[in-house]
Amino acid sequence: MTPDRLPRIVRPHRLSEEVGAVLDRRIRSGAFAPGERLPTEARLSEEFEVSRAVVREAIARLKAEGLVESRQGAGAFVARRLGAGVFRMGPGLAEADGALEIFELRLIVEVAAAERAALRRTPQQLEAIGAALARMDVALTCGEDGAMADDDFHCAIAAASGNPLIGRFVAFVSQEFSASRVPTWSAEGVSRGLAGAAQDEHRAVFDAIAAGDVEAAGQAAQRHLLSAAGRLGIVVPTLQVGDLQHVDEEGRDG
């Protein structure tokens, strides 16, 4: 029997996110020009009727997104080149389009990572993948939360790809995506068979990597990611060779 899928995850917005979103819009609209100093924490706190701690957190988020720069003793300024050198996941799982885009990105990167891990993994790296898998087995048996071990499993495969950029990128995506694994490993998710289904898929990926079967590893990783998306109610269209040719022809016609 196919496990029931979970309702879409909607992460509640924090006050700092709401303040940050308003400032983000002002910066991108040009209300605050590149290089312009932002209002002080006190003024923003008064305007938004929030604490200065909330304002500081909002500005910290804008800094992380490359929209704001700090100058020692002078305050926060709009970056001269917005978002330069920053990769941003956007709305992520909170919005349907964002969730679909994340899964498409994961398919592109993690399928390739599994294939390369099957070809390049060292005994120590295979042991790390297996250890994360074993921790999820224990979580299933004992009714514990296996979400962190789930994260570690995917990151260990990426690390075994032999490409450190893939490893770092998947680690970054996992941080952004980590909340999506929690419902699968919750008591409800375990009772509905979601965690067990995910673990069967994990084991198929591990077995293929352990066997050094590049094709089987890629196929198992793809099946797992498509199934994981389905458990969240997300349908990810798969791209065929004919689709690529059609897109290429449209590009030439344009």
Image (cartoon, rainbow, N blue to C red):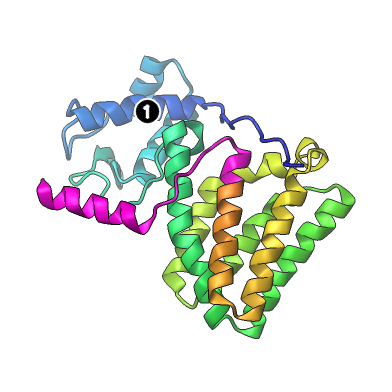
Res 248 seen here: yes
State the image coordinates of residue 153 (x, y, percent, origin top left). 65, 62
Question: Image quadrant for the C terminus?
Answer: top left
What residue lies at 40% left-to-right and 52% top-to-bottom?
239
What kind of element bears circle 1?
Answer: helix
Kind of residue at disc 1: Ala
Name the dominant secondary structure of the magenta segment. Answer: helix
State the image coordinates of residue 244 (x, y, percent, origin top left). 30, 55
Q: Magenta segment range?
A: 228-254
Q: Which residue is mark 1?
A: 21
What residue lies at 19% left-to-right and 47% top-to-bottom?
81
State the image coordinates of residue 77 (x, y, percent, origin top left). 25, 39
In this rendering, position of residue 87 left or right of residue 99: left
Res 149 seen here: no
What residue lies at 68% left-to-right and 65% top-to-bottom?
204
Of 164 and 185, the residue lying toward us = 185
The answer to whether residue 82 is above or below residue 170 is above
